[in-house]
Image (cartoon, rainbow, N blue to C red):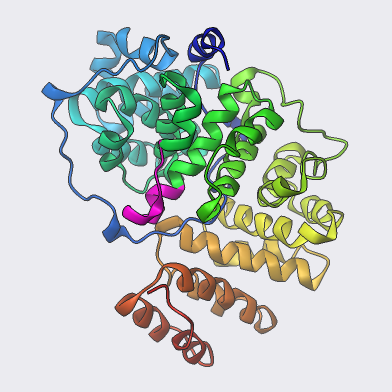
Amino acid sequence: MGRKNQDIKRNKWMIFLPGALGLAGLVVAGFLLFNKSDNPQTSNYNAASAIPATGGNGETETLALMKADGPEFASLASKNVQEIHSTCEGKSVPSEKFECYGAVFVAYMKANGGKRTLELLDQLQLKGGYAQSNCHPLSHRVGNIALHVYGTVPKAVPEYIAVCHSGYYHGLLEEYLATAESYEKGVAEVCGTPENQAYFNWFQCMHGLGHGVMQFRDNEVPEALKDCDILDPQNQSREICYAGVFMENITSDEKTGHPSKYLKKEDPIYPCNAVEDKYRGACYFLASSQVLKMNGWNFSDTFKACDSAEEKYRYLCYQSLGRDVSGTSHRNNARVKELCELGVTTFGKTECYFGAARDYINELGKFDTAIGLCNFIDQGYRDRCYSAIFYDMRQYATGSTFDEVCAQMPEPYRSQCRVQPRSS
């Protein structure tokens, strides 16, 4: 891409704003797993040494917002959580609510740092309303801001805490690509490799990269997917990036004001059934989220859409639906069972529970959180539900963590758990 085009792209608003979709139910593809002990627990924030990064030659709206930060929002940022929530929720349209919270986050982060800003967001979303239904995109905004406060992605990463399905990481990458001196080099190198960092951090970086390239390409899915192909294919880097592209495709309407041309109401599975085969798995892994958005969160109809998906990828559509069932129900066992039982086929219900169990694990990065769900559902689905737990444990759980989780399971799953291969 020529330098002129890069500069034009940098002036675009690099933001992820799902609006009515309610990202509580749209978890990042991949069912992220992490151990909280891998994440930094202390902040090294120093307001006096914060770096107002400018990146490349252009200026994003996030940076413009930071420069325009006025006394009104600085004052609001000093108020209690209820006052902030009431003021921003009282705005008349969603975009104004979003900008209100964003301006508060600018002032708050300058004074208190990224970690405490994420804590503020967590408290705000517990109050409900727009802050809760848009918790994930708001955390993207916090990440956008953090790049300019801390200057670089590596300096901003330690401020992460597990809030709103890690949108903080995604926002960091979006803003980074908007300001990088070399777009192609930025795509290829910014996330590094997982060998020398917490896998969770690396995964979130790669997923956020998918959001970033999608926005850089003005929501042109084919071009964004090819940008992901710049990545080294090891460790499924490309597939993780693809998923970020497809998630951004689902939610781009709130940013652009019109639905993506790569979504069709008359064909709710599109573009999963139209992209190259190497991209389809990542697309189907999010397929239910786009169907739910288009049909007004009708889970029964979404099962039917998955029933009609091409057989090779149908299981991924059902697992995607299980993830959305879990997220929208806030991991309530009874509600998860009620929604997964809307499936017509045993296979669809079984894979729904598999996806739901993995979302339980992803929410807090704890392998034992899905045990209660597996014990709650009907016996015929428990084997597959427990296999979801085993699947994630085999990849990431080690040592005493593995044994402690197994000990909480009833037989025969306790014995099956103890003989599972371990990551190290």
What residue is at 51 percent from the left and 72 percent from the top?
A: 389
Give how far across and how far down residue 193 sits, in percent: 40, 49
Examine the image and state in which quarter residue 254 appears: top right
In the displayed structure, would residue 139 be above or below residue 373? above
Give how far across and how far down residue 422 sits, in percent: 43, 77
- Magenta region, residue range: 190-203
| Quarter occupied by the N terminus | top right
Examine the image and state in which quarter residue 58 appears: top left
Q: Is residue 88 visible?
A: yes
Which residue is at the front of the view, 228 or 317?
228
| Quarter occupied by the C terminus | bottom left
In the displayed structure, would residue 228 be above or below residue 390? above
User: In the rendered view, does 229 fall on the left or right side of 117?
Assistant: right
Examine the image and state in which quarter residue 163 appears: top left
| Residue 198 part of the magenta segment | yes
What residue is at 30 percent from the left and 9 percent from the top?
A: 67
In the displayed structure, would residue 382 be above or below residue 36? below
Which residue is at the front of the view, 232 or 351?
232
| Residue 112 part of the magenta segment | no
Give how far across and how far down residue 301 sits, in percent: 81, 51
What residue is at 47 percent from the left and 58 percent from the top?
A: 362
User: In the rendered view, does 169 fall on the left or right side of 250?
Assistant: left
What residue is at 40 percent from the left and 65 percent from the top?
A: 366
Give how far across and how far down residue 349 sits, in percent: 73, 68
